[in-house]
Amino acid sequence: MLKNTEVLCFTEHWVKEDYLNLIQTDQYKLISHFSRKMYDHDRSCTYSYVKKGISTKELNCFKGISGEKEFEMSVIELVDYEYITVCIYRSPDSKFWTFFNTLELTIQIEQAKEIKLLMCGDWNINFMLDNIRIQEIKNLLQHYSLINIVRSPTRITPRSESLIDVIVTKKDNSELQVSAADLGFSDHLAQVVKIYVYTGKGNRRDKIVLRRQLTNINI
């Protein structure tokens, strides 16, 4: 699967910030990450890798938005493909309305840039349920013409199924195809996104963004 994968986004990896740059791969480079400092005993963070050779840009407009537990975010702009990928983790014991308001701010900043958006991550909000929180999130996404295109459970246990991992993009975005994969080292399924992008080089290339949940239990 990694052969055609150009972006890797992770949540809940439990890796200390000091160790992130020590993780070396032949194909990928670390572009963006968020690591906790206050809750050192409970490191749920995000980081994003991009295949070497892919042009990226630092996005200063998103600095200062992330917050521990409520809204942990890593952001990448893929210059050649005119996409911003935003990987977000929300802790289940965090303040929902802080997450909600920060999510709206993130969307507003992105839309001001007039570039395509792809949000992924573990929001710990079960889209299979029908409650006030789910309706508020769906209404927010709808207001900005966005939609979660993940339709099947992303975390399956012997006792429950839940859809708490998302892939969010524009409603009219026909470039994306999403599927799930069990890579065998987490209790969440990986969300695999194939993006059909015109690169301006006379051809359309398949791009895959892979998001994977890592926990202390499964590493």
Image (spheres, grey):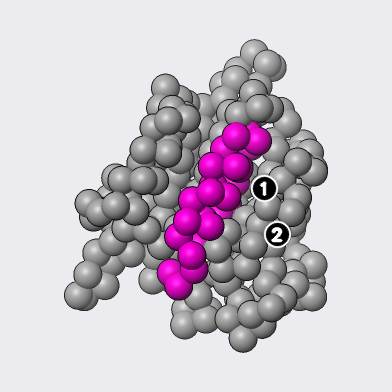
Residue 163 included in the magenta stretch of the image: no
- Vertically, is 38 above or below 32? below
Q: Residue 84: x and y, percent?
A: 63, 37
At 54% from the left and 42% from the top, the residue drawn is 104
Among the two numbered marks 2 and 1 on one chain, the one whose residue lies closer to the N terminus: 2
Residue 99 included in the magenta stretch of the image: yes
Q: Name the outermost residue toward the top.
A: 202
Q: Residues within 10 Å of mark 1 (few under 14, many from 20)?
A: many
Q: Residue 157: which numbered mark, if any?
A: none
- Vertically, is 116 above or below 179? above
Q: Name the outermost residue toward the left.
A: 159
Q: Amino acid at mark 1?
A: Val
Q: Residue 87: x and y, percent?
A: 58, 52
- Vertically, is 48 above or below 82? below
Q: Residues within 10 Å of mark 2 (few under 14, many from 20)?
A: many
Residue where numbered disc 1 is placed = 75
Q: What span is colored magenta in the figure?
A: 82-110
Closest to the observer, 158 or 203 = 158
Q: Residue 29: x and y, percent?
A: 75, 54
Residue where numbered disc 2 is placed = 33
At 36% from the left and 38% from the top, the residue drawn is 139
Q: Residue 163: x and y, percent?
A: 32, 56
At 44% from the left and 44% from the top, the residue drawn is 167
Closest to the observer, 140 or 196 = 140
Q: Amino acid at mark 2?
A: His
SS of the residue at dot 1? Answer: strand
